[in-house]
Amino acid sequence: MAPSTPLTETEKLLIDSYTNILNKPFEDKYEDKWDDDAFDRAVDQFKSRAQEIGFADPFELLARFKIESYETIRAELKKGPAPCFRPGWKSPILGNRIDPSVVLSRCDHVSGPRYTGQERIVVLDFWASWCEPCLQAGPEVSQLAEEFSSDDVIIIGVNNESIFGVTKPPKMDVLLPFLEEHEEDFQYTVVVDSAEGFAKDTVYKACGYRAIPCAVMLVDGVVTYVGSPLLTFRSVLEAAIASISSGSSSSKEE
């Protein structure tokens, strides 16, 4: 997590050095591709660079980003990213059937058009108010929802504030003011997951994608996409719209 105070130019130099020397070169070197000797050499290079910049102990700054030691860096890089962020990952629920009416019947509608059951393409976009990437994604997802609203498409934001931990009942007294404050960022349908986390348990946890925002797209009730609602999702959605016109569909992940 980034510190709340802006970084100085010297601090930025150290962070850039950490990224370019200790992080990026090892992003794809996890598990059986890991080389301890190469990492040790990188540590020595980073220590020298930190001294040049003016940091006798670079962890005085790195600790603000929850980076505590060279060994914790080594352990995280060696372990590698979660499976869903590795090349070639496929969600285990691709091709499965999910009835959106069952999922949404357990959620509380908050704003936006209601799901009617007539939409052939349903996007369930899991998010939480504390998630900065979710807030950043809001305007783009809103644009997609508005642009394709007449094409048998509905995009539904499924809020669950405890999506990564023990499921807790929703706090509407917190969520509603948040949505009012960010009304322009969430111009699409928003529902809140049940107190038991039905959507979380039956869709999000099953899909295998371990980040939010997370879009699960259903075409005629079949899961065809699991991943980010950003980046290439527009082209995925456009392809799905074309597929229902031509009578075919495909399963994808990002």
Image (cartoon, rainbow, N blue to C red):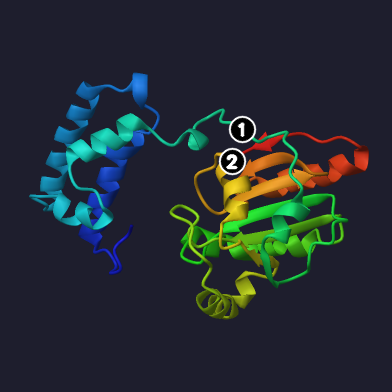
- Crowding at dot 2, Cα within 10 Å, few <14 / some 14-19 / many 20+, comes out as few
Report whether residue 166 is seen: yes
Q: Is residue 239 above or below residue 135?
A: above
Mark 2 lies on a secondary structure that is helix
Where is mark 1, residue-wise? 92
Residue reaching furthest top?
32
Where residue 42 appears, x then y in whole percent? 21, 32
Q: Quadrant of the C terminus?
A: top right
Mark 1 lies on a secondary structure that is loop
Identify the residue shown where x is 25% and y is 39%.
73
The amino acid type of the residue labelled 2 equals Ala
Indicate which disc residue 220 carries: none
Which of the pair 235/186 is nearer the observer? Answer: 186
Q: Is residue 139 left or right of residue 47?
A: right
- Crowding at dot 1, Cα within 10 Å, few <14 / some 14-19 / many 20+, comes out as few
Q: Is residue 55 left or right of residue 64?
A: left
Where residue 192 appears, x then y in whole percent? 62, 65
Which of the pair 245/61 is nearer the observer? Answer: 245
Where residue 147 appears, x then y in whole percent? 78, 61
Q: Which mark is first along the chain, 2 or 1?
A: 1
Residue reaching furthest right?
246
Q: Is residue 132 left or right of residue 182?
A: left
Indicate which disc residue 206 carries: 2
Identify the residue shown where x is 66% and y is 65%.
191
